[in-house]
Amino acid sequence: SNFFRSESFTMKEGDGELSGLRVMQQLLETSNKSNYTTSVYPTPILILLSGHKFDLSSNYRGLIVAQKPLRTSEIVPLLEANAQQLLDSGLCVKEVNEGGKGYRILNQRGTQMFYSYDM
């Protein structure tokens, strides 16, 4: 563990293969090619937790980036803040609530992620 104290971790251009970002991109590409309703294993909602603050290009549509540290209490607000991205990428669907007021945001399995009034 002295190694980690004396060595700093930095990412450079082209390090995507080492960071796991490429694997996440491949997962999203596979998900976009198949219909989520027919898939036995739907794509999970992917969150890249990084010590660096950055934005990803449109090639990573459906991948949420969060900066460390991320508390458990911040997960639902993070998903709510990225709801439109999750809907646009097909990882979640919007369902009108009974009574017509508000929306339920459901994942690919049909489980309610959260409730929204203003989408």
Image: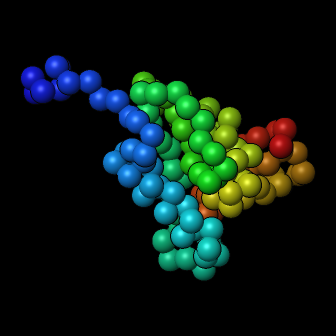
In x, y percent, where is residue 100?
A: 90, 51
Residue at the limit of the structure toward the bottom, as seen here: 38
In x, y percent, where is residue 11?
A: 38, 34
Q: Can see residue 15?
A: yes
Residue at the limit of the structure toward the top, as seen here: 6
Q: Residue at x 63, y 58 (%)?
A: 91
Residue at the limit of the structure toward the front, as seen here: 13
**Quarter of the image where the C terminus is located:** top right
In this picture, residue 65 sits left or right of residue 110: left
Q: Please state which of residues 93 and 101 is positioned toward the viewer in this rendering.
A: 93
**Quarter of the image where the N terminus is located:** top left
Residue 55 quadrant? top right
Residue 33 quadrant? bottom right
Residue at the limit of the structure toward the right, as seen here: 100
Q: Residue at x 54, y 70 (%)?
A: 30
Q: Please state which of residues 60 and 10 is positioned toward the viewer in this rendering.
A: 10
In this picture, residue 41 sits left or right of residue 84: left
Q: Residue at x 45, y 55 (%)?
A: 22
Above or below 43: residue 96: above
Above or below 90: residue 12: above
In this picture, residue 71 sits left or right of residue 6: right
In x, y percent, where is residue 79?
A: 61, 40
Q: Can see residue 112?
A: no
Q: Please state which of residues 18 and 97 is positioned toward the viewer in this rendering.
A: 18
Q: Residue at x 49, y 63 (%)?
A: 26
Above or below 38: residue 3: above
In this picture, residue 74 sits left or right of residue 7: right
